[in-house]
Image (spheres, rainbow, N blue to C red):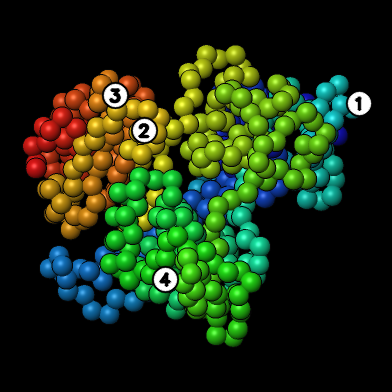
Amino acid sequence: MTISCDVAVLGGGTGGYVAAIRAAQLGKSVVVIEQDKLGGTCLHRGCIPSKSLLRSAEVYAEMNESENYGIETDGVRLVFPKVQRRKEAVVEQLHQGVQYLMRKNKIQVLKGKGRIIGPSIFSPRSGAVAVELEDGEMETVVPAHLIIATGSRPRVLPGLAPDGQAILSSEEALTLEELPASMIIVGGGVIGVEWASMLADFGVQVTVVEAAGQLLPQEDEEVARELQRLLKKRGVKILTGTLVDAESCRVTAAGVTIGARKGDKLEQLSAEKLLVSVGRVANVENIGLENTDIRFDKGVIEVNANMQTGEPHIYAIGDCIGGLQLAHAASHEGIRAVEHLAGEPLQPYHTHLIPRCVYTRPEVASVGYSEKEAAEKGHDVITGKFPFSAIGKAVVHGLKDGFVKVVADKTTRDILGVQMIGPHVTDLIGEAALAQVLDATPWEIGEAIHAHPTLSEAIGEAMLAVDGRAIGM
């Protein structure tokens, strides 16, 4: 059977289903092809389940610290199976929401494995998709435009392939039935430090091994140092500038042992389980790309500023094109691809203006360039910094760690970047992102009246600090 449509989306993750909805809003007939569940990695094996676990860990930590607020508790107990059930309920509720949106927007969903086919009797050009359905039947989708949104999967380190028992990927760790007593985390990027923070709050002994000289290698050095200090304060052992020796890894009944080398120093690490968290790999295999003129670069699909591949009627978005592998980036790219194919006017797309969030305790958030990046790009940099310890609401909530840092151009006064570490900064980063989109100056944001007492006052004060005008210091 052949299905013709205006837009087909190969992959029903966050980027894919958002693209599908936008296409339907613009009057296009849409087919989404998804081999697993709508929502993809973010909803089922990434963002949402991990944030649910992080929230439970945060609540548990707060209850254990309740005496600091004058509340004495007795017998606080962590029941991890209930934590997992709550996570599953959150995921299912949001999954039902995505399914509802497909029905509401009259989007056809085919559950099956899709593969792009070349020119054939179905279409004079590549871009049609052969879909093997769950029952073994075949469908052929022939779209005017195809959007590839196949996402990514955890990267595997040679010699440390996950076995689902002692050695885990981040996806497998989400399904743990019980907490281990100890965990080695290989990789101190976003996923690694989130797991370190979560497990530490749950009472697990954690060791993080990061090859780079700092945690969160892509983030501001001051922020990384502060996060490392605070994680160490909570008992996390952190080894930066350190490489694991995969060949030395041994799995026994007691757990995992592995060597970790920093310069000439070799240390033997042991724990009940080991989590490999060293980035993600684009899902570009076995989807028929060899039947097209789509080009690759370093394992990801090459696209132009409008998300078009080497074949102009075929677009690609999200993790499979590399860059910032973030759900909100994929969604934005999906909307951009659809609006381009529909002939809608587009604004320039600046990837450095995509907010980056880390859901540790405390949280980390940033947008734009770090101080080092701005200097490397030739800017005469000036900064402003303000601590949460001087913010009334942070003190009231007992969440005084961290700061807001503003990076600006000394000559033009343009905001070049904002970095934050502290309470709820993943919610606060939106103001900084808007400021950069509007080409605001620190003076303009500082002049905006920030309500008191709120955490957002830290942003206003940091902006004023660029010109030495911060009131609270």
Q: Distance between the residues labelled 3 and 4?
A: 41 Å
| Residue visible at 55% across and 30% down in the picture | 333
In the image, residue 284 lies at what x, y percent?
A: 71, 43
Q: Is residue 34 visible?
A: no
Q: Nearer the viewer, mark 2 or mark 1?
A: 2
Name the residue tied to disc 4. 206
Q: Which of marks 1 and 3 is in front?
A: 3
Q: What element carries label 1?
A: loop
**Residue 242 shown left or right of residue 134 in the figure:** left
**Residue 62 shown left or right of residue 197 in the figure:** left
Q: Which of marks 2 and 3 is in front?
A: 2
Q: What element carries label 2?
A: helix
Q: Distance between the residues labelled 2 and 3?
A: 12 Å
Pick the residue in front: 430 or 464.
464
Q: Which of marks 4 and 1 is in front?
A: 4
In the image, residue 337 lies at what x, y percent?
A: 59, 25
Q: How far apart are marks 4 and 1 (CA)?
A: 58 Å
**Residue 300 shown left or right of residue 131 in the figure:** left
Q: How far apart are marks 2 and 1 (CA)?
A: 53 Å
Give the class, few, some or many, for how many residues have Cα within 10 Å of label 1's Cα (few <14, many ≥20): few
| Upstream in sequence: badge 1 or badge 3 | 1
Name the residue tied to disc 2. 374
Give the numbered dot on residue 468: none
Name the residue tied to disc 1. 121
| Upstream in sequence: badge 3 or badge 4 | 4
In the image, residue 245 lies at what x, y percent?
A: 58, 69
Looking at the rendered image, the quarter that the C terminus falls into is: top left
Pick the residue in front: 317 or 74.
317
